[in-house]
Amino acid sequence: MISVSTQLFLVLFSLLLVLPVVEAVEAGDAIALLLSVVLSITGISACLGVYA
C-alpha cells in the first residue's frame, strides 16, 4: 500500500503537470487553486488525526 505522503506528492505533481497546459488559467488562479488544494489536504489530515 502506498503511503499517504506519497499519494499527496503524486496528486500535487499531477496538478503541477496539468496547470501549465491550460493556457486560460492565469497565474493568480493557479496560485489560488494550489493554495486551496494544500489547505484542503491539511484540513483533511487534521480531521483524520483528531479521529485517530
Image: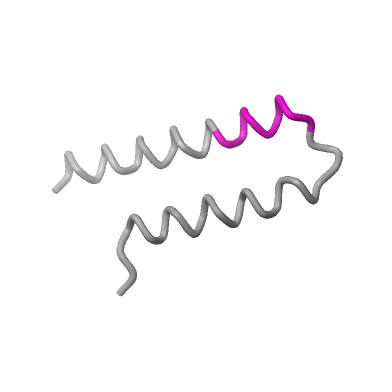
Q: Does the magenta stretch include residue 49?
A: no
Q: Residue at x 44, y 32 (%)?
A: 39
Question: Residue 41 falls in which quadrant of the image?
Answer: top left
* Helix, strand or loop for the magenta stretch, by majority: helix
Q: For the view shown, which residue lies furthest in the bottom direction?
A: 1
Left or right: 21 with respect to 34?
A: right
Q: Position of residue 47 (x, y in %)?
A: 26, 39
Instruction: Name, please, the residue furthest toward the right.
Output: 24
Image location of residue 7, percent across then percent down: 41, 60
Q: Nearer the viewer, residue 4 or 16?
A: 16
Percent of width and height locating residue 40:
44, 37
Quarter of the image with the N terminus in it: bottom left
Q: Which residue is drawn at 34% across and 70% down?
A: 2
| x 36%, y 37%: residue | 42
Q: In this view, does 42 lie to the left or right of 38?
A: left
Q: Is residue 4 left or right of residue 11?
A: left
Q: In which quarter of the image is residue 43?
A: top left
- The residue that appears at 63% across and 30% down in the rendered structure is 31
Tell me where the magenta segment starts and ends, as one range: 26-34
